[in-house]
Amino acid sequence: MIRFDAVSKNYPNGTTAVDALSLELAEGGLTVLVGPSGCGKTTTLRMVNRMVEPSAGTVSLRGQDIREVAAPELRRGIGYVIQHAGLFPHRTILDNVATVPLLLGWGKKKARSRAAELLELVGLPATMAKRYPYQLSGGQQQRVGVARALGADPPVLLMDEPFSAVDPIVRGELQAEFLRLQKELHKTIVFVTHDIDEAIKLGDHIAVFRTGGKLAQFDTPERLLAHPADDFVADFVGQDRGIRRLSFVQASGLPLREGPVLPVTAPVADARSLGEPWVLAVDAARRPLGWAATADLPPGGTLADATLAPLGHTFALVGDSARAALDAALLSPSRLAVGVDADGAVAGVADAYELSAAIAGASARAGASAGTAASADASAPAEPAAPIDTTKSAAPAAPAELADPAAPATSAGTSEAPDAAEGPDLGKAPEAGRPPGAAETSEGRLVKSDADGETSADDSAGPESDGTLDSADGVAGTDGPGDAGGAGSTGGDGR
Ligand code: ADP
């Protein structure tokens, strides 16, 4: 869909912002460009909509060299979202979102009705439509920024650190919401961030850049964590990459065993006869109630008479990852993680050792699954790939609610806007002991659980100069934010 062929960007001051970049981004996929500050991420992003022109090489979109397309036309198919949203301060939220449809001559009524749909799509209540940007929180403004970029249903979205300016909790909410949206919309997204956690959470593929504008690795998040190409990538990904890999392994494939589980109505003597240090008491529906320490059991009666230690937390076989399972083991007083089924009934238990062995098997399968990775690691096992959740990279047609047969295939591109703008294998493992072969028996399926540039001559064809925005409401050229990275600066070199 988007292809970089030996693309470099050199500035007259001798800076090589991007160095011989070759990369192919899949249609309908979310590719994250990540790396330390100044490594060329934004420059790479901006070469996609011709806000920055390459010094060498070719950028193509659906097979066409983008130099063959006039920048304004190109940008109509490319939405652009920046940090701080870059909204027009004196326009209502509705009118901010209606910007691009208005630019495209949809007419006020249709443009506003489209804007209202988009606000709903990004999870903002209709009551916000008449407010002004300053009356919204940072997170809400960022949602508006996304809604605006989606204005005319562009196939491509460029997002430059869009969630970096909000606090971690709101950022987490925005990321989750954005993933939900992408599952629905299947846009081809290029997303810049310096935050590797965000990259891993959001990306179908991740391009890690190193200083000097060099691509260090292009891979799936799983592969990046399992097989960093070199020390730089390993360092950048962080020391807890082993733990983070577990987010990609479904709990449903983990080998659980029956474990010391008894109904709370069972006699204390039965619990003692199991010969285990801890016994899990369950209700009539096998829902876990708590752990009883065998050493502290009362002399007689039932488990109901025992003091139960809290569970910590359980993990769901469907929906949770191996990371949640391992965490459950670490927090459990018995050191046993309790897996529950969809009804919350205990399906089995496993300790951290058993989990990690199973996880190792799943990760090996993950290592064999990097068919599209540019930097596929030769050390990757040659096993068949474990199924990976590809829901985010499928590319069906745009949803009906965004389709407008009467509208051109255009974009809410803020570059045109002034501001840039399973059941488990229960009982397979021995009751006691930690099977070294657990990795081989694991089903371990992979999942993904749990926002200055130089401008081209055509940059002058941005909203300030192509006259279209002015003709929409006459205010465009002057109210962009002072963000040199925003579309407000598409008409000039922000650096
Ligand atoms: P990132 O987005 O990874 O932080 P950028 O793509 O913004 O990095 O910048 C890459 C390098 O190019 C940096 O060293 C930056 O200073 C330099 N650079 C960017 N724009 C210009 C410019 N217009 N003139 C000179 N150097 C620039």
Image: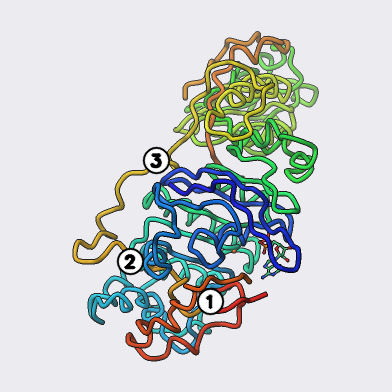
Q: Which residue is mark 1?
A: 86
Q: Is mark 3 within 8 Å of ligand 1?
A: no
Q: Is mark 1 within 8 Å of ligand 1?
A: no
- Residue 343: give x, y in percent of width and height: 45, 33
Q: Looking at the image, which residue is at 62% across and 68% down? A: 166
Which image quadrant for residue 78?
bottom left
Q: Is mark 2 within 8 Å of ligand 1?
A: no
Q: Which residue is mark 3?
A: 394
- Name the colouring of the figure: rainbow
Q: Secondary structure at mark 3?
A: loop
Q: Amino acid at mark 2?
A: Ala
Q: Looking at the image, which residue is at 59% across and 26% down? A: 366
Q: Is residue 59 left or right of residue 156?
A: right
Instruction: State whether residue 298 is above or below residue 139.
Output: above
Q: Amino acid at mark 3?
A: Ala
Q: Residues within 10 Å of mark 2 (few under 14, many from 20)?
A: many
Q: Quadrant of ligand 1?
A: bottom right
Q: Is residue 17 left or right of residue 110?
A: right
Q: Secondary structure at mark 1?
A: loop
Q: Residue furthest left?
A: 406
